[in-house]
Amino acid sequence: MTNTATVIQGQEVLFGDDELIVSKTDLKGRILYCNTTFMRVSGYTESELLGAPHSLLRHPAMPRCIFKLLWETISDGREMFAYVVNRTRNGGYYWVFAHVTPSFDGDGTVIGYHSNRRKPLTGAVRTIESLYRQLLDIESRSHDRKEGMLAAYQALFDILKEKGVGYDEFILAL
């Protein structure tokens, strides 16, 4: 049975190779800054985005386990790269290659997060879509959302181990 959340529908919004989508958030993921490219591609206005949780853009075709990995990584003060499909205000979607980094104060304490998103390579999206469908299928098998996410999280690392690569190596090689 196909999980309907894995089917990406709606109008794809594209942006240029030379454009960056930029945002800054607080520690809870609430948007503090968004550039004009972010607003244009997502379809939201600045006033709709500022103060809103970044999860406003979460597309159901994104596995929850990827966000678990993201939050663990950046909360620990490390950067992370990820392919992400986001939902637009009008129900469309757009793919990005995201680079998310913690922002630090003068004492080295994480005070928020900064993300630059670029246009992803088409071949990388095809590869990642297949992986994400696998992970979403695992997530949907459990009646408990948390258990499903944890099972998919473990499956992700099992897949990487089988390929003999770490997460960063896998993502950056796509």
Image: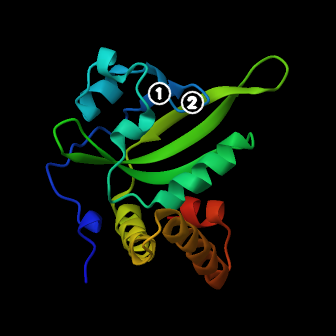
- Please report contact status of discs 2 and 1: CB closer than 8 Å, yes or no: yes
At x 16%, y 38%, the residue is 90
Please provide percent x and percent y for residue 127. Answer: 40, 70
Disc sitting over residue 23 in the figure: 1
Please provide percent x and percent y for residue 138. Answer: 45, 76
159 shown above or below 91: below
Q: Is residue 84 left or right of residue 94?
A: right
Q: Amino acid at mark 2?
A: His
Residue closer to the observer: 174 or 68: 68
- Can the viewer see residue 141 in this picture? yes
Q: Secondary structure at mark 2?
A: strand
Q: Secondary structure at mark 1?
A: strand
Q: Amino acid at mark 1?
A: Ser
| Mark 2 lies on residue | 114
Residue at the limit of the structure toward the front, as seen here: 143
Q: Earlier in the sequence, mark 2 or mark 1?
A: 1
Badge 1 density bin: few <14, some 14–19, many ≥20, Cα 10 Å: many
71 shown above or below 89: below
Please provide percent x and percent y for residue 67. Answer: 52, 52
